[in-house]
Image (tube, rainbow, N blue to C red):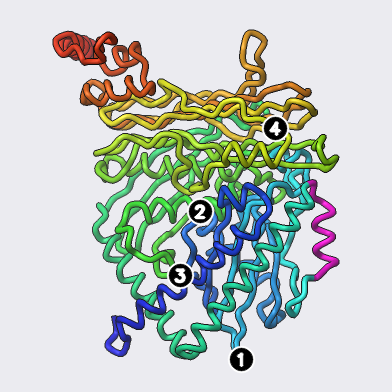
Amino acid sequence: MTTDIDPIRFEVVRNSLTSATEEMAATIRRAAYSTNIKTRADFSCCFLDRELRVVAQSFAQPIHLGNLSNLVPNAVRQYGADRLVDGDMIIVNDPYLANIHLNDITVFAPVVIDGALIGYLANLAHHVDVGGGAPASMGVTREIFQEGVRIPPVRIVAGGEVVDDVFRLILAQIRSTRETTGDLRAQIAANITGRRRIADLVGAIGREELERYIEELIAYTRRRTRHEVAQLPRGEYVADTTLDSDGYGGPPVRLKVTIRVDDDGVLFDFTGCDPQRAAPVNSTYGPTYSACAYALKALIDPDVPVNSGFYEFVRVIAPKGTVVHALPPAPAVGAGEVNMRLVDLIFRALADALPDRVPAAAKGIMCHAGFGGIDPRTGEYYCVLETLAGGYGGRALLDGPDAVQPHTQNTENAPIEETEAGYPIRIARYELVPDSEGAGRNRGGLGLRRQYLFPDHAVSFSVLADRDLTGAWGIFGGEAGRRARYVVNPGPDERVLDSKETIQLKPGDLVSYETPGGGGYGPPDERDPTLVLRDARDGKVSLERARAAYGVVIDPAGWTVDLPATTALRAGRAAARTSAS
């Protein structure tokens, strides 16, 4: 820190900027209409300086925040910074500007105080519907034009007043007009809240002083990030994997990363990934960049701030025209599925170099459930969009948590009570899936089962996910987690769905999701038998699986481990492995 920077004031300014974005987040959550935004917290906020460098951001979804660091600069440059004045706000959702997919709508505003541009406030929220071929805009598509309304950077607020023509034009493309109206106004209100807080800070210390401390904050983050990167093992690390399917019967989608760690930071090179497809398995540049930024942040000191000083060390090569940098008119709706798998892939590449920091694969999918129809109670069109939790990967010292929305996802649970009160559906079951974990010295987390029942009306339902053919991999001898399963009307006459499919349901139909478990870490026979017993008593692992996967024999009469039988069983399994090798 330079000598003319007061360390106490530095912390006050740093936390004031972060608090401004957190207040923006609180405003969105309190004012939004949709469950996806107000309850599941599927949104993010940030502040950029006048040079379009990220300075502060709310604690929210990493996939959004990495995107905003690219999207807002691109959108400002395309629209023209000189065209923006105090009281203006711009709306944009174009994936090819580094957005995620069309459902993710960003609203940003210049912060102009006393005639001087201070910076930009931005927030991104996932809307439950943006039109297109299927309710919730999560259908299986061939090109971007089928996915909904695509919004270039346009003015949604001018001089403090909503531009009604633009607002109505957007709403005319969307099914869930009531919720979308409320959610967009919540985003506008968030920027107003953020501007008020930035203005308070300027009033307290002055514009030039604020700019000086912003410069120091970015420099401070740069120094700390450089120090952290210097601790990472130098070298080149490679891994590849595939998405199971593309929704149209094509071959698995190949993903490959080569990671180079050097003095300039970390380079993520995705040369070797498949060409983009006319299918919902593409990421544009923004989500690919977000996966890399998140992975690097997860490997360094968690106290390092996330701003432009950190992002400078994230270098990405994502060849244009591939599934990690798709170009028009490629679909973008499945960008989140690619993003989630890239995070696991990066950790897989670094596992041998950083065994104490890297987990086994998590569920590896956003796991979208999107549906809608006419609400028989009101006669209005409704849409619901959820992403479902799954297992986290086992770690060097701990099991993977059960049923979480990990990594870049970080959204929250949609409670049954709120879902059933707000929409004409019933949640028939919501529970952990026993025996879905990847076995290991530290096991993976369990997936969950969530069942949607539509008692009295027809519905269009879209599954947009993956992992129904291959489970989340284990590392260092750990086993893969259980695969996902998507089914209509489970039972003798059930219909198993593809992981990317839109179907029409009749009244009384039920859709069941069983999400993937996380991969295991280390050999299962090295797991502490008392931990296996605990999982069996909790109903997470069956007695049969305790024996088959972990070599642990449990006496169900007294719920105790039969240590002699367990020792003998594990010794026999070890001998069999030795002879086989």
Viewport quadrant of the N terminus: bottom left
Q: Is residue 54 left or right of residue 441?
A: right
Could you say which quadrant of the image residue 106 lies in?
bottom right
Label 3 to label 1: alpha-carbon separation: 23 Å
Q: Residue tagged by mark 3?
A: 18
Label 4 to label 1: alpha-carbon separation: 52 Å
Label drawn at residue 61: 2
Label drawn at residue 425: 4
Label 1 to label 2: alpha-carbon separation: 33 Å
Look at the image and tell me whether residue 578 can be seen: no
> What crowding class fits label 1: few (fewer than 14 Cα within 10 Å), some (14-19), or many (20 or more)?
few
Residue 185 falls within the magenta-colored stretch: no
What residue lies at 28% left-to-right and 31% top-to-bottom? 442
- 92 shown above or below 524: below
Could you say which quadrant of the image residue 367 lies in?
top right
Q: Considering only order in the chain, which callout, 1 or 3, is on the residue closer to the N terminus?
A: 3
Q: Considering only order in the chain, which callout, 1 or 4, is on the residue closer to the N terminus?
A: 1
Q: Amino acid at mark 4?
A: Ile
Q: Considering only order in the chain, which callout, 2 or 1, is on the residue closer to the N terminus?
A: 2
Q: Is residue 306 left or right of residue 228?
A: right
Q: Residue tagged by mark 1?
A: 114
Q: Is residue 193 left or right of residue 502?
A: left
Residue 166 falls within the magenta-colored stretch: yes
Q: Nearer the viewer, residue 259 or 33?
A: 33
Q: Considering only order in the chain, which callout, 3 or 4, is on the residue closer to the N terminus?
A: 3
- 124 shown above or below 273: below
Q: Considering only order in the chain, which callout, 4 or 2, is on the residue closer to the N terminus?
A: 2
